Image (tube, rainbow, N blue to C red):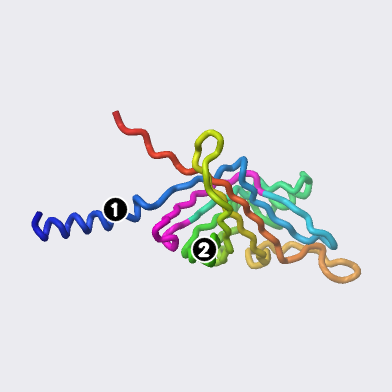
Amino acid sequence: MTKTRFAALAAAVALASPALAADTYQFDKPHTNVGFQVRHIFTMVSGRFTDFSGTIEIDRANPEKSSVEFTIQAASIDTSDPRRDQHLRSADFFDVANHPTLTFKSTAIKPNGTNSFLVTGDLTMRGVTKQVSLPVTLLGEGKDPMGNDKIGFETGVTLNRTEFGLNWNRALEGGGTLLSDDVKIQIAVEANKAKPPAPAN
């Protein structure tokens, strides 16, 4: 093989390697939780979103080249109180008629210790995009009883809702406000490895 042909082959292999090294995982919705907590006067009230999707690309050779993105349907908010959920869908909060989704797309991933990563990306909520950093922990990976490849991650972060235009509140007679500005986000993801496409006949 001539040096020129060898160099061309080496370059082709180098370009193909990252794609071959990456594994694609899709969020397993029934086993994933996208939740939040916000203070209401004294206590923390919990809620969650029930309709979402997400994709994780894992480059095991170069973790910093991995990526994650997900989309949440804002109308799927559920706090176990239908009247409150309707208010949260209104223009006072998520304004789902005009901003039906919340999205996150990573821009950088850095290893941050054993099984830990700092995932930075663009979070868009109610039409406002802010850069946020999520501390992510790898919970483990393996096969389920049906032989499917699974992986698990979790993250938690506190966001100021007013930075995304969710400003509604009420002043209390004794001082303070009905709701806190800070919202605690907790996401626990179980994801399935995408199966390779079936060979063409």
Foreground label between 1 and 2: 1
Secondary structure beneath disc 2? strand
What kind of residue is marked 2? Answer: Gly
Along the line of sight, the residue nearer the viewer: 149 or 43: 149
Q: Is residue 53 magenta?
A: yes
Instruction: Assess disc 2: are there few (<14), some (14-19) or many (≥20) residues with their C-alpha within 10 Å of its C-alpha.
Output: many
Image quadrant for the C terminus?
top left
Between 175 and 199, the one nearer to me in the picture: 199
Question: Which residue carries the number 1 mark?
Answer: 16
Residue 128, position as x, y percentages in the image: 58, 63
| SS label for mark 1 | helix
- Tell me residue 194's x, y (percent): 45, 42
Q: Residue under label 2, please give it.
A: 121
Residue 12 location, x and y as percent? 23, 55
Q: Please indicate whether residue 146 sits to the left or right of residue 160 in the image.
A: left
Q: Is residue 144 above or below residue 4?
A: above
Under mark 1, the amino acid is: Ala
x 75%, y 59%: residue: 38
When the figure is inspected, residue 38 is found, relative to residue 25, above or below; the finding is below
In magenta, the rendered stretch is: 49-67
Which quadrant of the figure has residue 171?
Answer: bottom right
